[in-house]
Image (cartoon, grey):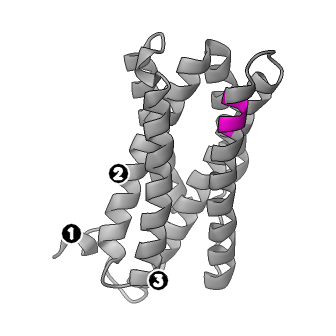
Amino acid sequence: MSSADANLRPGSGALKRRLHEILRVDHAGELGAVWIYRGQKAVFDAAPGREKISDDLGEMEGHEQAHLSRFDSLLNAHRVRPTAMAPLWRLAGFGLGVGTALMGEKAAHACTEAVETVIEDHYAGQIAELADRDPELASELARFRDEELAHRDKAVAEGAHEAPGYDLLSTVIRIGCRAAIRISEKI
C-alpha cells in the first residue's frame, strides 16, 4: 500500500469519502484561520500605534478568506457538508486570536507561526496524496500552502520566536491545530 492510500478506508466509495474528508478539513482550517486573524485584528485595531500589524493581519486574513471562499465552492461542487464543528472553530479561532494579541505582537506572530507550521505539514501530506489522483486540486493546495508558508516566514521575521513563553505557547497551539484537523476530517 502506498503512503497516498494509507488514509483510505476499504470499500466502495473510498476515494470519494477521502476527498470529502480533505475538503471538509481544509475548509474548517481556513475558517479557523480567518477567525484567528479577525480576533487579532480586533485587538490591534483598538490599540493606538498598531496600524502596521493590523494592516499585516488584514492582508493575511484576506488570503485566508480567498482560500475559504474556494473551499466553499469546492464543498458545493462536490456536495460535501462542512464540519459540524464550524461554530466552535469560529469561536475558538477568534478567542485564540484575541488571546494571543492581548499577549502582544510577538505572541500574535507566534500563533501564526505555530498554526502555519502545522498547516504546511498537513497540506504537504494532502498534496502528495492527491498528486496522481487529482493533480489540479494538488496544484491548488500547493499554491495555498505556499501562501501559508509566506505567513509563517513573515511571523518568524517579525519576532514570533521572541514571544514570552514561546515554546509552551507554540506547543499548545500546534497540539490544538492537530486535534482540530483530526476532528474536522470526521465530524
Work out how far the residue at label 3 is from the one at label 1, CA to CA, in angstroms.
Answer: 17 Å
Horizontal side of residue 16 vs 38, given as left or right = left
The disc label shown at residue 16, or none? 3
In the depicted structure, whether residue 110 falls above or below residue 184: above
Can you name the residue that lies furthest to the left here? 1
Q: Position of residue 55 (x, y in %)?
A: 72, 36
The residue to which callout 1 is attached is: 3
Evaluate whether residue 17 shows in this view.
yes
Dot 2 falls on a residue whose secondary structure is: helix
Q: Position of residue 160 (x, y in %)?
A: 46, 24
**Magenta span of residues:** 53-57
Nearer the N terminus, badge 2 or badge 1?
Answer: 1
Work out how far the residue at label 2 is from the one at label 3, CA to CA, in angstroms.
Answer: 22 Å
The residue to which callout 2 is attached is: 121
Q: Name the amino acid, label 2.
A: Asp
Q: Position of residue 152 (x, y in %)?
A: 46, 40
Residue in front for this viewpoint, 137 or 152: 152
Can you name the residue that lies furthest to the bottom here? 12
